[in-house]
Amino acid sequence: MAAPSSLASSRLAAAAPAPQHHHQNHQLRLGCSRRRAQRLVAMAGSGKFFVGGNWKCNGTKESITKLVSDLNAATLESDVDVVVAPPFIYIDQVKSSLTDRIEVSAQNTWIGKGGAFTGEISAEQLVDIGCQWVILGHSERRHVIGEDDQVFIGKKAAYALSQNLKVMACIGELLEEREAGKTFDVCFKQMKAFADNITDWKNVVIAYEPVWAIGTGKVASPEQAQEVHAAVRDWLKTNVSADVASTVRIIYGGSVNAANCAELAKKEDIDGFLVGGASLKGPDFATICNSVTSKKVTA
Ligand SMILES: O=C(CO)COP(=O)(O)O
């Protein structure tokens, strides 16, 4: 593995944003020494830029064969973790044809051990076929399928982690919640449901995906995304620990594409992306993965 690009130290090197009242802890974090930040990254895992491709309910055997072949042919920067999430029924096909350079995720899992649960797929089964990740709490599962924090999402995270699946934990507000000034309240409530169920965060990536930006072509501005990422990090510092706050990766999702990824990636608290539509096009997805170069520390 290449030397980890220290996101925490790149945050330190980046110009600090204008102070805002709710960013007090964040400012403190930025003030900690570079050496300490690097030590924290080393403790929590690779600290690499992270890009996930959520294929949602798309694809056929044929189109997925083409997508996998494009991904296998792509040149990817070494300092980015790349994961794709095909529909369940294609995971096996993707696992057996995709380069090991890219890990594979499911888009959902059952809440506990498998058994008499018609139509469900268990964490054990995902592990059995070599799947390494699962996306949980995606807005389409919350708002279209009706999963909620209390009954499903937190417990799914706990069980998946207990079976050694790594988790992309999704949070994000609806448009009306943003317009009502409730963005932080909604995100923090969703974070609490995860935090109440997670004891070890080293296999967790948080995905901030504002619902109004998903599949709409209406990407959050880099400043809008950065503001929420910084606030979530502050929440983690207060409610989980300073170490987790400094080291957990917080990625952005919602209309990310090859044209807008570089500007977003420059923001200090944006540690990567969860990509929907653009992840179905191999070359565009590779461009998004390689936007890690916008992150590199030059100082
Ligand atoms: O939901 C998403 C990823 O999980 C984002 O989807 P789009 O990139 O298509 O907006």
Image (cartoon, rainbow, N blue to C red):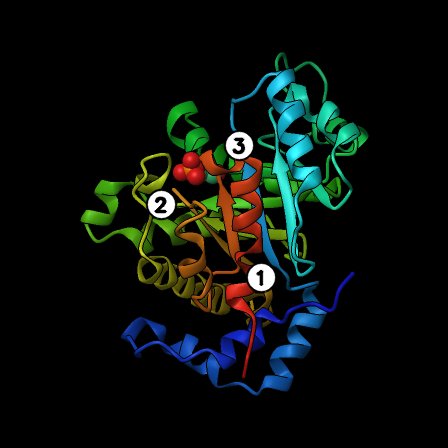
Image location (x, y in percent) of residue 99: 76, 39
Mark 1 secondary-structure assignment: loop
Work out how far the residue at label 1 is from the one at label 3, CA to CA, in angstroms.
27 Å
Image location (x, y in percent) of residue 266: 45, 66
Quadrant in the picture for residue 267 = bottom left
Mark 3 secondary-structure assignment: helix
Image side of residue 178 versus residue 292, left or right: left
Ligand 1's image quarter is top left
Q: Amino acid at mark 1?
A: Val
Image location (x, y in percent) of residue 160: 67, 39
Task: Answer yes or no: disc 3 within 8 Å of ligand 1.
Answer: no
> Disc 1 or 3, which lies upstream in sequence?
1
Number of other residues with Cα within 10 Å of mark 1, as a class: few under 14, some 14 to 19, many 20 or more: many
**Which residue, given by chain and number where applicable, does mark 3 sit on?**
280
Q: Is residue 146 above or below residue 213?
A: above
Q: Residue at x 64, y 85 (%)?
A: 35
Q: Are marks 1 and 3 in contact (CB under 8 Å)?
A: no
Work out how far the residue at label 2 is from the one at label 1, CA to CA, in angstroms.
19 Å
Work out how far the residue at label 2 is from the one at label 3, CA to CA, in angstroms.
20 Å
Q: Are marks 2 and 1 in contact (CB under 8 Å)?
A: no
**Which residue, given by chain and number where applicable, does mark 2 sit on?**
210
**Which residue, given by chain and number where applicable, does mark 1 sit on?**
248
Q: Which mark is residue 279?
A: none
> Disc 2 or 3, which lies upstream in sequence?
2
Q: Residue at x 47, y 80 (%)?
A: 30
User: Which label sits in the foreground, 1 or 3?
Assistant: 3
Q: Amino acid at mark 2?
A: Pro
Q: Residue at x 33, y 47 (%)?
A: 219
Number of other residues with Cα within 10 Å of mark 2, as a class: few under 14, some 14 to 19, many 20 or more: many
- Residue 111 visible at all: no
- Residue 90 visible at all: yes
